[in-house]
Image (spheres, grey):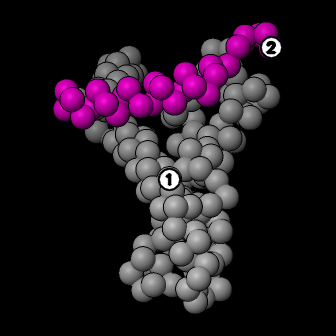
Amino acid sequence: MMVLKEANGWSDEQLFENCRFNLLVRSALGLMNMDDAVPVESTYYLFRKRIVEYEKSEKINLFEKTFASVTKGQATDFEVSGKSIRMDSKLLGSNIAWLSRYELIHETLRLVCQDIKEILANHFLTRSQKEMIENLLKETGNKVVYRSTSAEIKTKNAGIRIACIYGD
């Protein structure tokens, strides 16, 4: 599921939608019958979290090992050199860590803004600052990450950094 998500640039929401209703995606996941259950979101997120934790503790990137093994097997089976790889497992692992970091940043800022909301209301803020605070307060970090693509998250993060640096 993570490979399909990254390869297609889907948000988590788009991933689960495709897993439930797109027959090609279901087939790629080995779900051949319509009554085959798609893994639930909590299982997906727990698996993703455990992969990151394992890499931190063991210093082993499981995606890198898996892709290397698959590539080696394909190179042997199809008698090719295997010097070029179409999809890099490091990209997948770094995107998982990146989205986790954004979720943490977003949630921290949201909680701070929520705690000092009354103080902020008594100060003169620009319109864009007020909009940014309102947007932060609307959704928890995990919801933002769930419905946003990687590109959207990068845009959101850039906006937060600019606001923090320039006070706007």
Residue 74 point in image, percent of width and height = 39, 22
User: What amino acid type is highlighted by mark number 1?
Assistant: Glu
The residue depicted at 52 percent of the width and 61 percent of the height is 115
Total tally of numbered discs in the picture? 2
Q: Give the Cα separation between the discs numbered 1 and 2.
A: 37 Å
- Residue 163 position, x and y percent, is 47, 79
Q: Secondary structure at mark 1?
A: helix
The crowding category of the residue bearing disc 2, from other C-alpha atoms within 10 Å (few below 14, some 14 to 19, many at least 20), is few
For label 2, the SS is loop
Residues 13 and 23: in front is: 13
Q: Does the rendering let one see residue 159?
A: yes
Which range is magenta? 32-59
* Residue 16 sits above or below residue 122 on the image: above
Amino acid on which the number 2 mark rests in the picture = Met
Residue 79 colored in magenta in the image: no
- Tag 2 residue: 34
Can you see residue 9?
A: no
Question: Which residue position holds label 1?
Answer: 107
The residue at 65%/86% (across/down) is 127
